[in-house]
Amino acid sequence: MSTSITIPRPDDWHLHLRDGAMLQAVLPETARDFARAIIMPNLVPPVVKGADAAAYRDRILAALPEGMAFEPLMTLYLTEDTDAEDVAAAHASGLVKAVKLYPAGATTNSSSGVTNFDKVRPVLEKMAEIGLPLCTHGEVTDHDIDIFDREAVFIDRVLDPIRKATPGLRVVMEHITTANAADYVRSQDKDLGATITTHHLIINRNHILVGGIKPHYYCLPVAKREEHRIALRAAATSGDARFFLGTDSAPHTDANKLQPCGCAGCFTATNTMPLLAHVFEEEGKLDNLAKFASENGPNFYRLPVNEGTLTLTKGDAPTAFPQQIDTQDGPVTVFDPGFPVHWKVA
Ligand SMILES: NC(=O)N[C@@H](CC(=O)O)C(=O)O
Ligand SMILES: [Zn+2]
Ligand SMILES: [Zn+2]
């Protein structure tokens, strides 16, 4: 018995493509299934100015294999020195679709992020005026806050005050991992959306820690308790327009993951769509997969839904996904859901 589902071609509203050899290796993994993606700016050095984003966009398009179509939607990395006029010009030209807020030190390559939020007020006010969304890595970095509480505390101490002080600012809470975040989104107006990753619909913190430490399940924000995973599944599969797919596919070489101090990030670009079909079917919500992966995101970003389609089919045999992809920097392990998945992209 086999089943199939056809949806408008999906987009990824939170993606790490890196640069150089890594970009070359991971870009086809996304471009194969996705029409567009919001490209994270946390390179070393970060993508801060409009000119940096234009140059990075050119490098991405140059790395795209012949015959593949893909549109990178560029973002700027917000620093305390970001110039509001440069942001406005990059938005007006159509180049930049969002600005990314990293609290300094919160995650991979975030050392140029924001410590004093008062310093970025002029930029946030300009963004509210021109309707340019702010994407947030929503975790505080205070040493006295437990890592499992850092998202919930960010909402109370940083996000809610910023939104109250900046009426009209459109915000995407990126890669939410808690019921607290999903509830906060639902309690607010349409100027607030949230992305949810594939892996946070599949793993909880036990997957990382029980039976030995599993570095390939370690990402930030770190996966939380099972009750939070259940809440994220409810939000993602609900069809609610404020929740949409951002895979946060974040490639690191195995050499960098399998360390005494290993990098944070799960690489899910290769198998995200089949995994999502599995999750949505399990929840009895396959009909809402198109909303989550293809419609809610463009609607929030005020872009058209893609005209092409993607078909997923379910077969009798489990799909064999590659365990790793090769890069010139070394292998990158593909996220393993830990159960057989029968869906594949047709
Ligand atoms: N999610 C992660 O664990 N890592 C991301 C950064 C981020 O999105 O926080 C990365 O760039 O590797
Ligand atoms: Zn992040
Ligand atoms: Zn990310």
Image (cartoon, grey):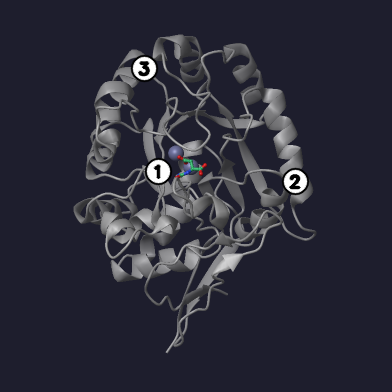
Marks 1 and 3 close (CB-CB < 8 Å):
no
Marks 3 and 2 close (CB-CB < 8 Å):
no
Which structural element holds mark 1? Answer: loop
Q: Splitting the image into 4 quarters, where does residue 290 fall?
A: bottom left
Q: Residues within 10 Å of mark 2 (few under 14, many from 20)?
A: some
Label located before the other in sequence (1 or 3):
3
**At 62% across and 24% down in the image, what residue appears?**
48
Does the Cβ of the disc 1 residue fall within 8 Å of ligand 1?
Answer: yes
**What residue type is disc 3 on?**
Pro
Which structural element holds mark 2? Answer: helix
Label located before the other in sequence (3 or 2):
2
Q: Residues within 10 Å of mark 3 (few under 14, many from 20)?
A: few
Between residues 148 and 271, which one lies in front from this camera angle?
148
Q: Which mark is residue 61?
A: 2
Between residues 172 and 187, which one lies in front from this camera angle?
172
**What residue type is disc 2 on?**
Leu
Q: Which mark is residue 220?
A: 1
**What residue type is disc 1 on?**
Leu
**At 40% across and 20% down in the image, what residue appears?**
168
Q: Which mark is residue 299?
A: none
**At 72% across and 31% down in the image, what residue appears?**
54
Residue at the front extreme of this rendering? 260
Residue located beneath label 3 in the image: 167
* Vertical relation: 246 (above or below) 112: below
Label located before the other in sequence (1 or 2):
2
Classify the position of the C terminus by image quarter. bottom right
Question: x%, y% of residue 101?
Answer: 46, 27
Q: Splitting the image into 4 quarters, where does residue 339 fall?
A: bottom left
